[in-house]
């Protein structure tokens, strides 16, 4: 009688398991493509059980121990830590803000203004200066005349006009209009200042390119953070579904408590990953705010709903042509060439310095008057006077040793700038080659990880059906879920890394115009003379994989990268390199 009651109780208990596992009863669960009823096994799964799929009858009098009936408590969905108030932004807006508010770029532009002011100052050395002033002089006591006679006199004088310091019979020591300086120093100083302006302009362009790269990388980081959060949400929902399923089987006595504990642990880890992903979203938003010089308390949110590959540099261009293009476009090389021209001008100026005169041309005009105790009036005789002074002299500094030292110093600076140009040239070539390799490697990874996500999705669905049909083991489903989660994260990373590599390659080329990157488009059946026949394949020559099924989620999601073949019912996607 007792065995019959227990045997009658088992179907009702299994019916409760089925209701508990229904999509309406499991938060975050999704219905299968082909619903399958849950069939209770005739025997519990155990570690020492036979092959998977085999069944064994168990006595109906089996009772679970206290340890087995104490199932783990599943964590509820963690509340979000993100502020609902967001500020949407796209890449174009971010680049515009970076061009206006980036501190590094503003500093570089001010340095251009500074160099232009110094060039204007150097050009002004060709113009005379004007001095307006006066002087008053009085003397009491003996003075010596030019013939050696000592004369006791009390005299005074005053001068007002262009210039100053007109005393006695001498000229106006501070001319009213004066032009002075060494001819070579003034001429070559002005020519060198023009090259300094060119250097600052090229440096400003280089800073602009780096600001462009920093902004795009920060925006890609924001997209990575939002995409990671979306993937973490998908993985968390899958883990919650598996945890509810294993807990339901364990509660019905048709599964092991260890499997339920393992699934609950996996769910807790995925909840932690989701919170960490939300923290990464806030961090990436603050980093973009720093680049754009905006309030970091504002949470920026990308307007892009999909993380898709963004090709910028066309693939048909070989790396040798890209390096040649970068050597023509990069502003760093222009800056180094301007620096070389500046040092060459300074070297030439130091060589001609001993042969260049130092000149002074002065003209003064004003009124002067005065007197002494020897003549009348004591103070009077005011009238106008003019003075014109001109002189030139040549200087050999320190018996010529100083001039030789200046020449050697200028020659060493020429050598330094030339070696710096070689270093910059090597760095640019390495940057282009590295970015080129990264773009191709990341593009190949996109196809590989896309196929991994596709196969992982199919494997997870198959294992889920097998477990619900009591054929598979929970640990197999957990393993499939982990592999699928890893493939999703790697797929997202491959796309974002590809976009970052494309932006880095574009900056490494010096942001050339579109016509510099334009290449003839191959036409079917028409092959240009001397060009190889193009093959519609990826860099490895393999056919493109089929696209992934679209699965919308909250936040940024991944988009398929190939649309040449898609299952029925899926919308086409725009993708490619």
Image: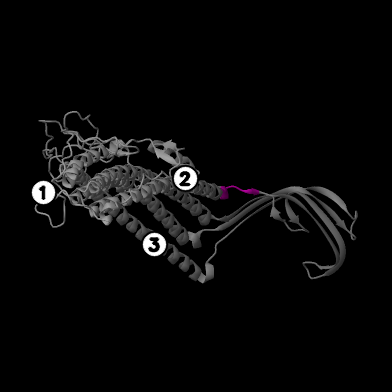
Q: Residue furthest front?
A: 1
Residue for badge 3: 416
What mark, if any, has residue 247 been given in the picture? Answer: none
Q: Residues within 10 Å of mark 2 (few under 14, many from 20)?
A: many
Residue 282 in picture, x, y percent from top left = 42, 46
Q: Secondary structure under badge 2? A: loop
In the image, residue 560 sits, relative to residue 362, either above or below, namely above
Determine if residue 368 is in view: yes
Residue 24 in picture, x, y percent from top left = 29, 35
Residue for badge 2: 102
Front residue (pair 453, 244): 244
Front residue (pair 78, 39): 39
User: What's the magenta region?
Assistant: 124-129
Q: Of label 1 and label 3, which has the lower sequence position?
A: 1
Residue at mark 1 to residue at mark 2: CA–CA distance? 74 Å
403 vs 423, left or right, is right
User: Which image quarter is the N terminus in?
Assistant: top left
User: Which image quarter is the C terminus in?
Assistant: top left
Q: Is residue 89 magenta?
A: no
Q: Nearer the viewer, mark 1 or mark 3?
A: 1
Residue for badge 1: 57
Front residue (pair 83, 88): 83
Residue 54 in picture, x, y percent from top left = 8, 49
Q: Of label 2 and label 3, which has the lower sequence position?
A: 2
């Amino acid at each position: 009688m007792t065995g019959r009651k227990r045997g009658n109780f088992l179907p009702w208990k299994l019916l409760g398991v089925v209701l508990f596992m229904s999509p309406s009863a499991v938060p975050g669960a999704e219905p299968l493509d082909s619903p399958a009823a849950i069939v209770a096994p005739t025997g519990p799964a155990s570690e020492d059980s036979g092959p998977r799929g085999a069944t064994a009858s168990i006595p109906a009098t089996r009772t679970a121990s206290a340890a087995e009936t104490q199932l783990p408590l599943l964590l509820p969905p963690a509340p979000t830590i993100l502020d609902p108030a967001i500020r949407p932004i796209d890449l174009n807006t971010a680049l515009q803000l970076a061009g206006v508010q980036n501190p590094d770029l503003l500093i570089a532009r001010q340095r251009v203004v500074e160099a232009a002011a110094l060039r204007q100052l150097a050009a002004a050395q060709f113009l005379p200066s004007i001095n307006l002033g006066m002087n008053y002089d009085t003397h009491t006591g003996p003075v010596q005349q030019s013939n050696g006679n000592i004369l006791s006199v009390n005299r005074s004088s005053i001068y007002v006009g262009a210039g100053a310091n007109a005393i006695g019979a001498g000229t106006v020591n501070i001319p009213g209009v004066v032009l002075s300086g060494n001819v070579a120093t003034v001429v070559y100083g002005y020519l060198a200042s023009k090259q300094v302006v060119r250097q600052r302009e090229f440096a400003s362009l280089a800073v602009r390119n780096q600001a462009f790269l920093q902004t795009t990388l920060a925006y890609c980081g924001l997209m990575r953070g939002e995409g990671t959060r979306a993937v973490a949400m998908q993985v968390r929902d899958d883990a919650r579904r598996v945890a509810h399923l294993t807990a339901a089987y364990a509660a019905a006595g048709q599964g092991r408590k260890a499997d339920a504990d393992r699934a609950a642990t996996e769910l807790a880890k995925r909840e932690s990953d989701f919170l960490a992903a939300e923290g990464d979203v806030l961090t990436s938003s603050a980093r973009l705010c720093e680049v754009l010089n905006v309030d970091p308390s504002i949470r920026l949110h990308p307007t892009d709903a999909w993380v898709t590959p963004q090709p910028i540099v066309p693939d048909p261009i070989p790396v040798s042509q890209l390096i040649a293009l970068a050597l023509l476009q990069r502003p760093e090389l222009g800056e180094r060439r301007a620096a070389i021209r500046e040092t060459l001008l300074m070297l030439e100026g130091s060589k001609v310095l001993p042969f260049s005169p130092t000149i002074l041309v002065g003209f003064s005009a004003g009124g002067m008057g005065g007197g002494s105790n020897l003549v009348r009036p004591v103070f009077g005789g005011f009238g106008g006077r003019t003075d014109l002074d001109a002189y030139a002299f040549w200087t050999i500094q320190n018996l010529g040793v100083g001039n030789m030292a200046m020449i050697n110093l200028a020659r060493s600076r020429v050598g330094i700038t030339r070696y710096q140009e070689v270093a910059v040239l090597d760095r640019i070539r390495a940057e282009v080659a590295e970015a080129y390799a990264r773009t191709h490697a990341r593009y190949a990874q996109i196809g590989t990880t896309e196929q991994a996500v596709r196969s992982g999705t199919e494997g997870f669905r198959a294992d889920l059906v097998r477990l619900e049909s009591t054929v598979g083991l929970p640990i197999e489903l957990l393993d499939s879920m982990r592999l699928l989660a890893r493939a999703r994260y790697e797929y997202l990373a491959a796309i974002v890394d590809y976009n970052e590599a494309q932006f880095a390659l574009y900056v490494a080329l010096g942001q050339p115009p579109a016509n510099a990157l334009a290449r003839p488009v191959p036409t079917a059946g028409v092959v240009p003379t001397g060009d190889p026949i193009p093959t519609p394949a990826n860099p490895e020559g393999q056919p493109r994989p089929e696209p992934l099924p679209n699965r919308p989620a909250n936040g940024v999601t991944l988009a398929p990268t190939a649309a040449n073949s898609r299952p029925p019912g899926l919308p086409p996607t725009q993708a490619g390199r």
